Structures are given as C-alpha cells and as structure tokens.
Image: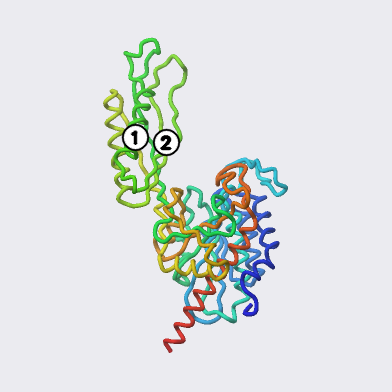
Amino acid sequence: MNKITLLQAAVSLEQEIITHRRHLHQYPELGFQEFITSEYVAEYLEQLGLLVQRGVAGTGVVALLDMGRPGPCIAVRADMDALPLQEQTGLPYASRHEGAMHACGHDGHMAMALGAARMLTGLKQELIGTVKFIFQPAEEMLGGARHMIDAGVLESPRVDGIIALHMWPDLPTGSFGVKAGTIMASMDHVDITVFGQAGHGAAPHQGVDAIIAAAQVLSALQVLVSRESDPADAVVLSMGSIHGGSIPNIIADQVLIRGTVRAVNTATRQRMKTRVTELAQAVAAGMNARAEVRYEFGYPPTVNDAEWVRYAKGAIRELYGEKAVHALAHSQMTSEDMAYYLEHVPGAFLLIGAGGKEKGRFPLHHPELAVDEKALCYGAAYLAQFVRNYLSDTQDLSRKGQ
C-alpha cells in the first residue's frame, strides 16, 4: 500500500463499494431490526480477517483491526437503520422491503466504512494500534448510539477518538462539510395536550373549545423563536402534528399537539423547555382551557473536537486538495446520535457531498432520494486516510519520545 495512494486504492475498489451500497439499499431494515444488514456486514468483515462481535446492543456489529503493535484505538462509526418510507425512485436496486427505505444515506455510510476496512487491512505492517469499526443500529430517533455505549463499545480496547461521515445531497460530490465545535443541533420532543370541555357545536358558549385554545397556543409558541431568541443563536421550533375532535358539530374537549425543538447550545435548550411549558399553560388558561406539557430531551448537540477536525482537514487536503474542504458557516439544525459518542471521546463528524449534478434535487428523508454513488469512493478513501494519518503521527511521536 506504500506504493499506491489510498485514493487509488479506493478507485480500484469503487465497484465493490457501490455493490455493497446497492445490496444494503435493497434490504433496508428499521431500527433494532437490522438482522439481514448486520449479518451481511459481519460476514464481510470476517472475510477480511477482523475480529467480529455480533449482536451488540441487539443488532450492532463491532469489528477490530489489530495492527499487532501497541498503540491508540480509533473508531470508525457507521449507522445501519433505514426509515419507514415507501421508496419511489424506480431504481433497479430500489428497496425490496415494503415501507422501508434507506433515505438518509446509511447504506452509503456502511459501504464507505466497509471499503475503508478493506483498505486498512493492507496497512497492518505499516501502522500501530487498533481500528474499531462500529456498525450501529437505530440512529433514527431511537438513539442506538446510547445502547452501543452502554454495551461497552468504547472500551476493550478503550477508544481514543471516533470519526464518521454523513452523506449530504445539499453539497456537491467531491466536497466535505467541515466544522469544529457544534456541527448539528440537539433534538428534543414536545407533546402538548390541551383540555377543554365538550359541548354542542350550536352552543359553543356552553363548552370550552380545545381546538380554538390549541390554535392560540400554536400561534403564541412562535414568539419564542421570533421575539425571545437571539437571531444569532440558532433555534427551531416545529409543531408537526395536531389531532383533536371527532365530528363537526361537537366542541372538541381535547387536542394533542406534537413537535420538535432544535438548539445548538445547552442554555437555549433549557430555556426553550421552560418557556414552552410556561407559555402553553398560560395561553390555554387564558382560554379557560388547560394544557399539559411533556417535554423530553433527545439527542444532544453534535460537537466536534477542534484537533480532530484539524486531522480531518489534513486528510481531505492530502487526498483532494483545499477545494474539497467546505467550511460550514453555521451548525446544521438536523440532529445525530453521533453526539453521544462525542460526549465521551473526541472525534470528527463530517458531511460528505453526494449531490452530483442534481445537487439538492431531493433532500434526505425523501422517498425519491438518490445520492450520487461517486461520493462513496471519496468517503472510503477519506476514512482510511484519516486513520492512517492519525496512527502514523502517533507512531512518529512515540519514536521521538524514545
């Protein structure tokens, strides 16, 4: 491998990496149900000679590539679950599972990690330490990362840091979205139940209309972003579901409003919880109704370590030049359970452009999403290059210390 660059190696493996992605795309599985997926991943890693552990946190897979000489342990993470969507791409390798689709790029994440694993096996004589490949279930809303951490994936051997990529159709293929500090927002959940009093639609004054009260609550909540939040402090409040009432001529006595709140810092996150609760209850009371608020903290912000981002930029430049480094101007308001790993160990979570010529035509979580498969080669080479650079630098420092 010394006589060939990792980019050249990735190009030679491009069709194999694409084959991985297309196979995984055809058999999507939802969170904690990734049985076919995890078996495919585990079998391939075993063929490479890695020490593989199946059934971690249910369906997770952990594989160790031991270089045979003591050194640090770096983790490469990929998520495995699909979304509950009916695919509408019409591609020949479209989902064969009714009501499930890889519409968030996780099939690509796995394919890139498998490609990197193959390339890194060729570097065993060159490097020290250990590479731990973490194939994680249930990233979508279920927090599979927490379950993997509880199962001990950051121990035995202890992980010194972790890297991962997320396919991003809003960026052109060949670019990498990079940001030190907070790259993605937190994700919290809010349920507001507004209680009124049922009555005849012809005599509304004899009841308390929960629908009208809920409408006032919804309207008032927008003030928390537009008038109470610093415009420079990114926060999103989206109430995406409302259900109430049964038939047209009965005053509804109960309405359920459900939504999500995203923020990039912990103080804003806590303030939103307090103010959503206070305002919903106060506005409902002003309408002679009552509001109960259930507010749950979900994924924390995804926070990159500055030093690991420096390594990431170095790997990108070495492979593709400065033009491939796309410095993100602000945090993305999407969320990722990669955040849980980064609360325990330093790391770098990057976005990899996968938009091709039709950049941004269909976003993530869309039933017609078709990412540019040329991105897979770029990503696999980057993951391998990052690991190679990190372990090589550690080895050089160790030799100087002697």
The one of 3 and 25 positioned closer to us in this rendering: 3
Is 213 situated left or right of 15 in this image? left
Q: Residue at x 27, y 36 (%)?
A: 278
Q: Quadrant of residue 276?
A: top left
Alpha carbon separation for disc pair 1 and 2:
9 Å
Is 399 situated left or right of 276 in this image? right
Q: Residue at x 40, y 65 (%)?
A: 306
Q: Residue at x 36, y 24 (%)?
A: 210
| Residues marked 1 and 2 touching at CB (< 8 Å) | yes
Location of residue 231 in the rendering, given as x and y in whole percent from the top left corner:
34, 45
Location of residue 341 in the rendering, given as x and y in whole percent from the top left corner:
44, 61
Work out which residue is located at the far right of the displayed protein and give it: 92
Seen in the picture, residue 288 relative to 367 is either above or below; the reply is: above
Tell me the SS state at disc 2: strand
Is 90 situated left or right of 399 in this image? right
| Amino acid on which disc 2 is placed | Met
- How many C-alpha atoms fall within 10 Å of the one at disc 1: few (<14), some, or many (≥20)? some
Q: Which mark is residue 344?
A: none
The one of 243 and 267 positioned closer to us in this rendering: 267
| Amino acid on which disc 1 is placed | Leu
Seen in the picture, residue 141 relative to 55 is either above or below; the reply is: above
Q: How is the image coloured?
A: rainbow
Is 184 situated left or right of 322 in this image? left
Q: Which residue is mark 1?
A: 221
Q: The N terminus appears in which quarter of the rendering?
A: bottom right
Q: Which residue is mark 2?
A: 239
Work out which residue is located at the far top of the displayed protein and give it: 202
Q: Residue at x 55, y 59 (%)?
A: 175
